[in-house]
Amino acid sequence: MDLATRGLAYGDSTCPMCGVADETADHLLDNCMTTNAVCWMVCVWDKSRCPTALKL
């Protein structure tokens, strides 16, 4: 659930990371290309397995 739905809207609700979709927890954790890329880079740097949910 996004902040606007909870009555906490404060301007533009577009994701500040990618600018493609509304900023929601679902978007940030599953659909945002930028956060997925950062997560992938951290996994590579840490030499750990990346979660299979990443869609790069």
Image (cartoon, rainbow, N blue to C red):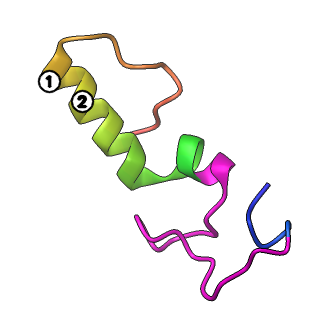
Residue lying at 55% horizontally and 50% vertically, measured from the top left: 28
Q: Residue furthest right?
A: 6
Residue 11 sits above or below residue 3 on the image: below
Q: Residue furthest top?
A: 48
In the drawing, what numbered circle is on residue 45? 1
Indicate the position of residue 46 as horizontal and vertical percent values: 18, 17
Three-letter amino acid code of the residue under disc 1:
Trp
**Residue 42: image tag:** 2
Which is more toward the observer, 36 or 12?
12
Quarter of the image holding residue 22? bottom right
* Residue at the far front in the pictured view: 8
Which percent across, then down, holds residue 23? 61, 65
Q: Find residue 45 and report its horizontal and vertical position in percent.
A: 14, 24
* Contact? badges 2 and 1 (CB < 8 Å): yes
| Res 1 label | none
Q: Residue at x 66, y 84 (%)?
A: 10
Report the front residue among 52 and 8.
8
Q: Quadrant of the C terminus?
A: top left
Amino acid tagged 2: Val
Report the magenta residues as a range.
Answer: 7-27
Q: Residues within 10 Å of mark 2 (few under 14, many from 20)?
A: few
Which element is circle 2 on? helix
